[in-house]
Image: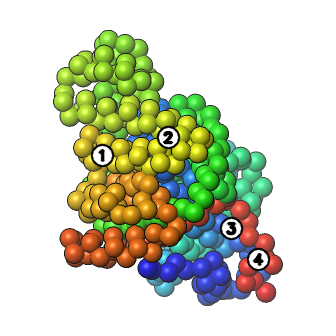
């Protein structure tokens, strides 16, 4: 099992980079924003459906402080490089920009678009312990982190939901990724030991305690990321929009999340294209499954919750077509292992991770046996993370950190 970098190690690296590139840490502050895992409700968040994610205790850390001039400087310990990337306060438009700094700069741009302009530049170093691009939302964590840094350094009055909306807006319009609100919402609004039952139609939400007595949430990273990630995601979104358009010939809906499976079955033939119909079916059924799963969890029926996770995987594999052979192996093999209550692909798809609920006494065996089978069948090493559910963004006070 791969050990994750601890918070202490990360803060040490972060501080070293900050000193190296920005000279000293005087006046610098430390921040954290979490990644997330979605327990159930996948590809429903841009369909006005329900999702059920939770924030994790892994995420992205920043050390940041204001500057006297108009420069905005970003350095990432994970991305490396021998100098920070530098922008001017007057140069926030996306044209001509590329690379990972598009994420934090997009948030600065989105703040400015809402009238929250920076009075001076700032410098920031970041370091994360989320495996990037694996479906645990390192991007949303970086966006929410940046928003939280701006709010804290410049005193902007923005609440958690607004931070989430700014992050999504910036990822949509600055990075060209048509993601829904789930990832940023989960990061910005996370609560320890709770998952967030969010209705993306109106952003109403409740926290549901995730009581996993003698069970663990285990994330398994396929360590593959297929090229299709962004284009495939945007394509799925378009299919759902086409389905809504077609269904509006026989009913009046704004989003697929408004339909029950029963209603969908009555009117599904209004969607002429078979492929689009299957995509729409997933969005409708997954939404219903999510509502049922949260109900099951509230009643303490983890077994039923786990079965619904498995059904979610099948639907994402067969109807929504966002899985891939490697991730299918991880989910399907997991279903046959002892102590596994449920396992499914999590995140946008086309690679990335599965999430499973595993009896504590079987976790070691799960990692061992799944790792072996995965290696045999794909030649690849899977990575395992036993995760805890954590809070949203926070400032790390000096006595909690390594700072002198
Ligand atoms: P996910 O959100 O599932 O991790 P994405 O493809 O949406 O995957 O986002 C990953 C991208 O976010 C990376 O390619 C990188 O551009 C950016 N990113 C996230 N965390 C960091 C980090 N610590 N340092 C630099 N870039 C990061
Ligand atoms: Mg992302």
Q: Between marks 1 and 2, how big is the CA–CA gap?
A: 15 Å
Look at 74% across and 70% down and name the residue there: 396
Residue labelled with disc 2: 293
- Mark 1 Cα within 10 Å, few/some/many (few <14, many 20+)? many
Question: Is 242 drawn above or below residue 387 in the view shown?
Answer: above
Q: Mark 3 points at which residue?
A: 31
Give the alpha-carbon distance from disc 4 to disc 2, as whole Å: 37 Å
Q: Residue at x 62, y 70 (%)?
A: 61
Work out whether mark 4 precedes mark 2 in sequence or the reverse, and give the earlier one: 2
Mark 2: few, some, or many residues within 10 Å (few <14, many ≥20)? many
For mark 4, what is the residue?
Answer: 400
Mark 2 and 3 residues: CB-CB less than 8 Å, in contact? no
Q: Is residue 268 left or right of 398 when viewed as pictured? A: left
**Along the polypeptide, which appears first: circle 1 or circle 2?**
2
Mark 2–mark 3 distance (CA, rounded to whole Å): 34 Å
Q: Residue at x 53, y 73 (%)?
A: 129
Q: Which residue is drawn at 49% across and 51% down?
A: 38
Rendering coords of residue 323 (x, y %): 28, 53
Judge by depth and name the residue closer to the eye, 153 or 215. Answer: 215
Looking at the rendering, which quadrant does residue 262 occupy?
Answer: top left
Answer whether labels 1 and 3 touch (C-beta < 8 Å).
Answer: no
């Amino acid at each position: 099992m791969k050990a994750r970098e601890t918070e202490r190690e990360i803060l040490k690296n972060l501080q070293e980079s900050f000193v190296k590139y920005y000279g000293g840490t005087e006046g610098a502050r430390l921040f954290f924003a979490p990644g997330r895992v979605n327990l159930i409700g996948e590809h429903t968040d841009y369909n006005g459906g329900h999702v059920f994610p939770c924030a994790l205790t892994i995420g992205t850390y920043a050390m940041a402080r204001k500057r006297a001039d108009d420069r905005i400087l970003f350095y990432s310990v994970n991305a490396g490089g021998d100098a920070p990337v530098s922008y001017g306060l007057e140069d926030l438009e996306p044209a001509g920009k590329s690379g990972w700094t598009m994420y934090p700069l997009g948030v600065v741009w989105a703040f400015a678009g809402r009238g929250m302009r920076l009075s001076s530049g700032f410098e920031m170093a970041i370091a994360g312990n989320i495996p990037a691009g694996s479906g645990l939302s390192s991007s949303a964590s970086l966006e929410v982190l940046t928003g939280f840094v701006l709010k804290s350094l410049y005193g902007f009055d923005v609440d958690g939901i607004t931070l989430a909306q700014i992050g999504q807006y910036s990822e949509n319009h600055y990075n060209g990724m048509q993601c829904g609100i789930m990832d940023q919402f989960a990061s910005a609004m996370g609560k320890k030991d709770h998952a967030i039952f969010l209705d993306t139609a109106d952003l109403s939400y409740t926290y549901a305690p995730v009581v996993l007595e003698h069970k663990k949430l285990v994330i398994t990273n396929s360590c593959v990321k297929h090229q299709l990630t962004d284009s495939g995601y945007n394509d799925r979104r378009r299919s759902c929009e086409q389905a809504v358009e077609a269904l509006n010939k026989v009913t009046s809906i704004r989003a697929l999340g408004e339909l029950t499976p029963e209603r969908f079955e009555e009117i599904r033939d209004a969607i002429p294209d078979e492929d689009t119909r299957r995509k729409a079916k997933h969005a409708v059924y997954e939404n219903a499954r999510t509502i049922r799963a949260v109900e099951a969890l509230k009643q303490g029926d983890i077994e039923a919750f786990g079965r619904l996770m498995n059904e979610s995987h099948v639907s994402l594999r067969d109807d929504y077509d966002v899985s891939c052979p490697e991730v299918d192996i991880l989910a399907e093999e997991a279903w046959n292992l002892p102590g596994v209550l449920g396992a499914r692909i999590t995140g946008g798809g086309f690679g990335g991770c599965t999430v499973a609920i595993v009896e504590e006494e079987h976790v070691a065996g799960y990692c061992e046996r799944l790792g072996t089978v995965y290696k045999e069948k794909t030649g690849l090493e899977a990575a395992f993370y036993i995760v805890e559910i954590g809070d949203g963004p926070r400032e790390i006070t000096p006595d909690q950190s390594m700072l002198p």
